[in-house]
Amino acid sequence: LKETIRLSPSSCRRKIFIIDETHMLTKEAFNALLKILEEPPEHAMIILATTEYDKVPATITSRTQRFNLRKITVSEIVSKLKKIVKDEKLKVSDEALELIAASAEGSLRDAESLLDQVTTLASEADLEA
């Protein structure tokens, strides 16, 4: 990141860097990130994502803007899952999608993972039959 972030984008105005699970970074990684956050290039945007904000050092959080994202509703998750099912040409009942969405507890990523597990297991069962 330290080397790549300094390079200007070739075809866009900005380069966007997303660091997911930021709370999992090592002390050394946080120190390196701190230097980048203190003097970021004009063309760079850094997005830090975490589910455990309290584990990110104050030296990092004090140099960032915080956006709290709400959990999405079961109906919103079902809608997204229906689109995935349609696009992937899968056969999953609406009742199953409702159960998956409710089990995901507001997380689309978890819902997609559950959908993947369900469809994989169903495919394996079909192959054994």
Image (cartoon, grey):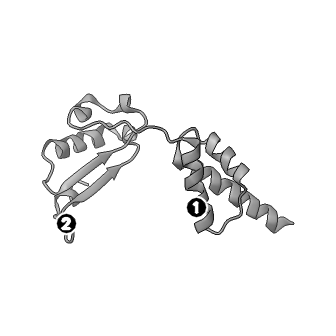
Tell me the quarter of the picture where residue 24 sits: top left
In the picture, measured across the screen, residue 80 lies left or right of residue 13, that is right
Question: Residue 9: which disc?
Answer: 2
Residue visible at 37% across and 43% down in the picture: 49
Q: Residue extending furthest bottom?
A: 11
Is 101 in front, or is 20?
Answer: 101
Tell me the quarter of the picture where residue 57 sits: top left
Specify few, some or many for label 2: CA neighbours under 10 Å numbering under 14, 14-19, or 20 or more.
Answer: some
Residue visible at 50% across and 42% down in the picture: 72
Query: Quarter holding the N terminus?
Result: bottom left
**Badge 1 element:** helix
For marks 1 and 2 on the same chain, the one whose residue lies earlier in the sequence: 2
Figure disc tally: 2
Q: What is the three-letter code of the residue carrying label 2?
A: Pro
Is residue 15 at all visible to an observer of this figure?
yes
Question: Residue 129: which disc?
Answer: none
Residue 93, percent across and down? 73, 56
Residue visible at 24% across and 39% down in the picture: 31
Reading the image, the residue beneath label 1 is 84
Specify few, some or many for label 1: CA neighbours under 10 Å numbering under 14, 14-19, or 20 or more.
Answer: some
**Badge 2 element:** loop
In the picture, measured across the screen, residue 38 lies left or right of residue 109, that is left
Q: Disc 1 and disc 2: Cα gap in Å?
A: 32 Å
Is 104 in front, or is 7?
Answer: 104
Residue contact between numbered discs 1 and 2, judged by CB atoms under 8 Å = no
Residue 102, percent across and down? 63, 40
Q: Is residue 127 above or below residue 22?
A: below
Query: Quarter holding the C terminus?
Result: bottom right
Q: Is residue 10 above or below residue 51?
A: below
Q: What is the three-letter code of the residue carrying label 1?
A: Ile
Is residue 110 at all visible to an observer of this figure?
no
Residue 119, percent across and down? 69, 59
